[in-house]
Amino acid sequence: MPTVRNSLRFILNDEDIELSDVPATQTLLDFLRLGKRLRGSKEGCAEGDCGACTVLVGRLSGGRLVYETVNACIRFTASLHGCHVVTVEHLSRPGDALHPVQQAMVEFHGSQCGFCTPGIVMSLYGLWMRRPDPTRPEVEEALQGNLCRCTGYAPIVRAGGAISTYGSLATDPLVAERETMTARLSALADGARVELGAGRDRVIIPADLDDLAEVYGANPEAVIVAGATDVGLWVTKFMRPIGPVVFIAHLAELHRIEASAEGITLGAGVTYSEAREPVLERFPQLAELWSRIGGGQVRNMGTVGGNIANGSPIGDTPPPLIALGARVTLRRGGERRSVALEDFFIAYGRQDRQPGEFVESVFIPSLPAGEHLAVYKITKRRDEDISALCGAFRIGLDDTGQVASARIAFGGMAATPKRARAVEAALVGRPWDDAAVEAGVAAFPEDYQPITDMRASAEYRMLTAQNLLRRFFLETQGEAQRLERGAA
């Protein structure tokens, strides 16, 4: 058993923070505004949508210090162990000169009422550190998670592309002091387990992956929190007590990514942002879906493993992962077992997971050459919206043009992410043509009986799902025709 310490340590701007009394449900935003009187970060939605609370969180990843934008309204204070939190107040320069991001916002009239401005400044700051000379699409993507009712975004986008006009990234404090901050954060990583509080306010931060297995085995009633992009709303919207809580975002073993000819393995703590490049390199068909999973703040916090373990019927990643034949590795203590992802979801709110057992990793097999794959996310607005339904289609054809294999999965059409086995059966063994597609369309009611809710009616969901199969067919035909024209 590792050493147990009863205090949480992180760095806030340039201040060393050590806390021994942190409620399990305290958000970073409340800590900043109420505890530290840092009120630049605002609460607009309390659910990670509007971005008014955006701050930067720096963490060590493979010995390298990485800064990412996060939503302070749903990020729990206790999850910040070993991190560097940077708020808008830390951007000031000697002589009270404006930071280049702030100066660009002034020069391009990017602020009107000003409520959302600090969050926008921090999102642009995070982008500037990654891309000193960003393209317009990169600026627009960086602002996906920031809502502004006043400006129409055009002046903000122009400001985001002009930041380097007002200063050099090389002289920015977070860049110039990176080695010093890396050393300070390394000193906080002492290999100890952190335990705070008791009962509903009990917080456990395991020392490593093996310690997590021990802790969760002894406390199977605890809630495991990685990114909190869903659990945060349990607290801010539903006022649910969630303790005891085991925080795992810091565990390096859960951030591993391994690629081989057979496929790619993602540790359960790999965020959407971390997974993006390796996943899209292997499965470029997922590019549009990946860029529409929340905003940048959500993708920096949320994890693929959490999206699976949460078991939501409208999670974005399960449908394509089921279509690709993904498997999850579950761990309890020192024991592990592998389960097909489609079998992991049993019923609404129920997964094939025993007490004390947690998702350790997910394996995504490579797509065989020549097979067709597409994913469609249907929402009321394009960016930062929860799916009304999400459909994933994978078809393999034989040399004669007949459907040799089919894997189709949907979210938002049933109580769990679910395969369309009747639709698949209607397609397999037939020529991949209009008649086969219409047979598949007719089979949808055998697989799904969707409900009506605030996001869509049952009738809309069913018709849209059927039309997505038609769309997929037409797109595969267009792809074949382009290849034929290229060969000619």
Image: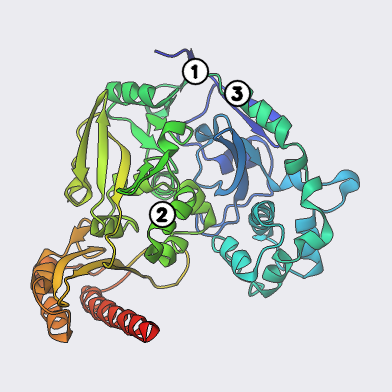
For residue 47, say whether it is visible. no
Mark 2, Cα crowd under 10 Å, few <14 / some 14-19 / many 20+, is many
Which kind of residue does numbered mark 1 sit on? Ala
Query: Viewed as shown, does residue 248 lie left or right of 339?
Result: right
Quarter holding residue 353: top left
Q: Earlier in the sequence, mark 2 or mark 1?
A: 1
Looking at the image, which residue is at 56% across and 48% down? 70
Residue placed under numbered mark 1 in the picture: 192
Nearer-the-camera pick, 248 or 370:
370
Residue 282, compared with residue 438, is above or below; it is: above
* Disc number placed over residue 279 in the picture, else none: 2
Mark 3, Cα crowd under 10 Å, few <14 / some 14-19 / many 20+, is some
Q: How is the image coloured?
A: rainbow
> How far apart in space, not on screen, are marks 3 and 1 (Cα)?
10 Å
Residue 121: x, y in percent? 69, 57
Which kind of residue does numbered mark 3 sit on? Leu
Quarter holding residue 159: bottom right
Mark 1, Cα crowd under 10 Å, few <14 / some 14-19 / many 20+, is some
SS of the residue under disc 1: loop
* Disc number placed over residue 139 in the picture, else none: none
Looking at the image, which residue is at 56% across and 40% down? 28
For residue 393, say whether it is visible. yes
* Quadrant location, the N terminus: top left
Query: Viewed as shown, does residue 327 lie left or right of 455?
Result: left
* Quadrant location, the C terminus: bottom left
Which kind of residue does numbered mark 2 sit on? Val
Residue placed under numbered mark 3 in the picture: 188
Q: Earlier in the sequence, mark 3 or mark 2?
A: 3
Residue 346, compared with residue 381, is above or below; it is: above
> How far apart in space, not on screen, are marks 2 and 1 (Cα)?
33 Å
